[in-house]
Image (tube, rainbow, N blue to C red):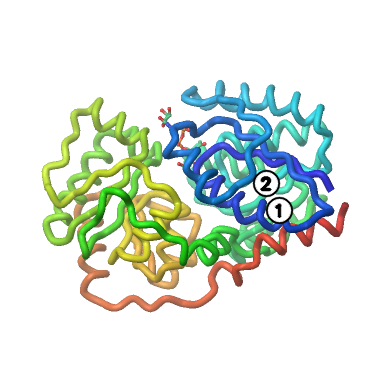
């Protein structure tokens, strides 16, 4: 079986690391990896390849920092050319980024089956570029690997039972990654306080709205007066903060460069709580048994909210601060195995092998 894998953004490197390891251990599979270039800073891309031993991509398309249409369009054009040359049996895409959509579109137009890892997730918020990307990707995929029962249910409601595709509950490859790398964690070079909250913020819906961004920052500043907040900054957020003159006015709000995955694992293990608008980090908080405040009004990972380990803080300062106090003042009970058993990558590869 010949697999053509498209990756481009930070969370995809982590997901691909576990699946590519499963592929490498199987001589009957040949994988070609293409990096679209969507993420390109050393600490947003290279460090993941170095630390997670991901096979080197055969091509890096170096497409980034463009509007969504231009970015997706250029990726589509170049991926089509490469797929025509490589003639894979299946094109493998991850998650919901512009790179995911471009890979899926290029393949489906050439009638090459698409395998979508992290299928079926929905935020029901069509203003999110990710929601558009994932809905279209799911619809044109042949193999839909869902991380949760909720994702399966979403697809069922959209009528996927009647589509010619295979919907599989594989579990979440990010859980495989967390288990595999848990004992390989590396402390961040900057050092961190003993007790702290780990925060991240990068979603366009938060960063591109000055009112929201300011309100979330005020919440960070307020909370950091009670417990230090460590905030590794996505380049998008840093650029916008500088543009808007947004300042950190608490020396307990510690801004750092983006961290590699092994450093994030270390931060997750040692923090008291997580505040984030990232999808992946919400789950990683759960994997490491940390309560999480989601800085959005909705989440795709509803099972976390339903089980009480995640609270939706939105972008309102007082709601975020209240959520922080509520978690701090009570114990959080973490249910087991919301995201499978840690063998999602194996299941995905085994399933595909039955067809080729
Ligand atoms: C993308 C994904 C998002 C995912 C996130 C993970 C889409 C629509 N969004 O968002 O789903 O959660 O990746 O991080 O695909 N930048 C740099 N250096 C980098 C990477 C980005 O400076 O290495 C800058 C870009 O130039 C741009 C901004 O950050 O100005 C946003 O980058 P972009 O790739 O458009 O989307 P993300 O916000 O990273």
Please report the residue visible at 61 percent of the width from the left and 61 percent of the height from the top.
147
User: Which residue does the numbered mark 2 point to in the structure image?
Assistant: 138
The residue under the point 25% across, 32% down is: 241
Residue 4: x, y in percent? 74, 40
Q: Is residue 161 visible?
A: no
The Cα–Cα distance between marks 1 and 2, rounded to whole angstroms, is 7 Å
Up the image or down, 62 lies above or below 9; here it is above
The numbered dot on residue 144 is 1
Q: Secondary structure at mark 1?
A: strand
Q: Is residue 11 left or right of residue 166?
A: left
| Quarter, ligand 1 | top left
Local packing at callout 2 (Cα closer than 10 Å; few below 14, some 14-19, many 20+) is many
Pointer 1 and pointer 2: residues touching (CB < 8 Å)? yes
Q: Quadrant of residue 211?
A: top left
In the image, which disc is placed on residue 272? none
Counting from the top left corner in percent of width and height, residue 29 is at 80, 50
Residue 39 coordinates in the image, percent (x, y): 49, 34
Q: Residue at x 40, y 63 (%)?
A: 285
């Amino acid at each position: 079986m010949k697999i053509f894998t498209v990756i481009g953004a930070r969370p995809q490197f982590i997901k691909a690391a576990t699946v590519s390891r499963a592929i490498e251990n199987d001589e009957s599979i040949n994988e070609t990896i293409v990096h679209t270039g969507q993420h390109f800073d050393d600490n947003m891309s290279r460090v993941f390849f170095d630390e997670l031993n991901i096979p080197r991509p055969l091509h890096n398309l170096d497409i980034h920092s463009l509007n969504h249409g231009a970015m997706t369009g250029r990726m589509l054009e170049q991926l089509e050319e490469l797929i025509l040359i490589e003639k894979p049996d299946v094109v493998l895409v991850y998650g919901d980024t512009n790179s995911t959509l471009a890979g899926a579109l290029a393949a489906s137009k050439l009638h090459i089956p698409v395998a979508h890892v992290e299928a079926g997730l929905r935020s029901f918020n069509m203003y999110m570029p990710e929601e558009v990307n994932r809905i279209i990707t799911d619809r044109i995929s042949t193999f839909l690997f869902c991380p949760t029962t909720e994702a399966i249910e979403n697809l069922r409601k959209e009528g996927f039972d009647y589509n010619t595709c295979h919907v599989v509950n594989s579990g979440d490859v990010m859980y495989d990654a967390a288990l595999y790398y848990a004992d390989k964690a590396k402390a961040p070079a900057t050092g961190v306080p003993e007790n702290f909250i780990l925060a991240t913020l990068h979603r366009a819906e938060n960063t591109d709205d000055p009112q929201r961004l300011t309100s979330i920052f005020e919440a960070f500043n307020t909370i950091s007066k009670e417990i230090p907040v460590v905030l590794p900054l996505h380049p998008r957020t840093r650029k916008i903060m500088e543009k808007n003159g947004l300042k950190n006015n608490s020396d307990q709000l510690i801004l750092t460069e983006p961290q590699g995955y092994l450093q994030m694992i270390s931060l997750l293990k040692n923090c008291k709580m997580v505040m984030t608008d990232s999808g992946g980090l919400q789950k990683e908080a759960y994997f490491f048994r940390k309560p999480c405040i989601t800085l959005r009004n909705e989440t795709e990972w509803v099972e976390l909210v339903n089980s009480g380990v995640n609270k939706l803080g939105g972008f309102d300062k007082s709601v975020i601060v209240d959520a922080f106090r509520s978690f701090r003042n009570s114990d959080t009970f973490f249910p087991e195995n919301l995201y499978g058993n840690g063998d999602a990558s194996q299941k995905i590869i085994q399933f595909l092998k039955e067809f080729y």
